Amino acid sequence: MKTPNGKVRVLIVDDSALIRQIMTKGLNMDPEIEVIGAAPDSYIARDMIVKYNPDVLTLDVEMPKMDGVEFLRRLMPQKPMPVLMVSSLTQRGGRITFEALDAGAIDFITKPSANVVNAMFDMIFEVQQKVKMAAKVNIQAYLATKKFSRRVPLKASATLAESTNKVIAIGASTGGTEAIRQIITRFPASTPGVVIVQHMPPGFTKMFAERLNGESEMNVKEARTGDKVMQGTVLIAQGDYHMNVIRSGGEYRVNCRQNEKVNGHRPSVEVLFDSVAKYAGPNSIGVILTGMGNDGAEAMARLRKTGARTIAQDEATSIVFGMPKVAYKCGGAERLVPIQSIAQSVLNILAEKNQ
């Protein structure tokens, strides 16, 4: 949604005057964005939302009087809108950020923990891109997908126990935490080993794995070099580390390294899928989910050529139909599947492979 002058109208909510100033200046540098106000707390933000009706809200996670997630929980039922959380790299900040994503926020941005002024300007490009992305989100459709029940695992087929040598590789970016959650929490404990790259900063991947582990029949953990890809286990790539699947004897294991970024990301879906193509090939299933850009798309095409089965999330249920769209168009994904059907689709493919 854009104004008649073509600009995305943004309201900034942050208790730090310095952050408000830097964010305002940085966002206004983009000709497609207009900051229409900046509020120091949730109560002033509420009045400004009523007055200005912004297209996108950037919302500080930790604020006095009322924190970001509590404000979000009150806002969404009354006036749903695209919200980007602005989080600090702290345990509390991370916890509240995930609660905010549960409450309907579509993505988050992390504040620098040191040299704030210079580092904030360094992150402005990311903020600009995510604000423009957020303005295109159909928030009502997104909130509708979140109502889908994800806590009841699917029934395991009789052949699933024979899939011990299979690898399920999943890649995601913007909106991926919710999409991954809807898949993993539906997998039965007997599902083959799963490896996941979700674009996320260091620290947040560990919290994401821990939260997912508490909701799943499978064992979910942040990956470390040497971890075995095995039945009943989900390995999530650590923030700022690429994750490769390798073959070690008769087993699959992961190798985590801080090599150069690929497609602007570390971890990169491209790196994961290429490693799965090399070592698992036809014994693998590739899944690409919601996200900006094209990370993983070309590697998925290479993965498919090895005989692997591949699927991508459809446009209707993706926050951003970027990565899945490119993967499908370049021949990487066999078909597009709504998020609520992907877990069953993967299990169906596994059943086919074992017949």
Image: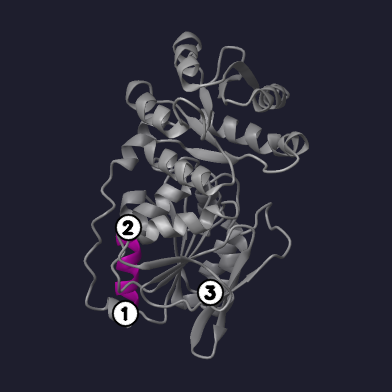
- Decide whether residue 308 is among the magenta residues: no
The label nearer to you, 2 versus 3, is 2
Q: Where 293 falls versus 18 (above or below)?
A: below
Q: Which residue matches tag 3?
A: 306
Extreme residue in the top direction: 51
Q: Which amino acid type corresponds to the residue marked 1 in the rendered image? A: Asn
Which contiguous range is marked in magenta?
342-353
- Give the crowd class for mark 2: few <14, some 14-19, many >=20 residues within 10 Å: some
Left or right relative to 194: residue 125: right
Q: Position of residue 341 (x, y in %)?
A: 31, 54
Question: SS at mark 3?
Answer: loop
Q: Where 233 falls versus 68 (above or below)?
A: below
The label nearer to you, 1 versus 2, is 2
Q: Position of residue 87 (x, y in %)?
A: 56, 39
Q: Which mark is residue 354?
A: 1
Question: Residue drawn at (24%, 62%), measured in percent from left and top?
Answer: 154
Q: Nearer the viewer, residue 37 or 106?
A: 37
Question: SS at mark 2?
Answer: loop
Report the magenta stretch's main SS. Answer: helix
Question: Residue drawn at (47%, 22%), measured in percent from left and top?
Answer: 42
Q: Which residue matches tag 2?
A: 215
1 or 3: tag closer to the N-terminus: 3
Q: Which amino acid type corresponds to the residue marked 2 in the rendered image? A: Glu
Question: SS at mark 1?
Answer: loop
Q: Residue 29: in sight, yes or no?
A: yes
Q: Which amino acid type corresponds to the residue marked 3 in the rendered image? A: Thr
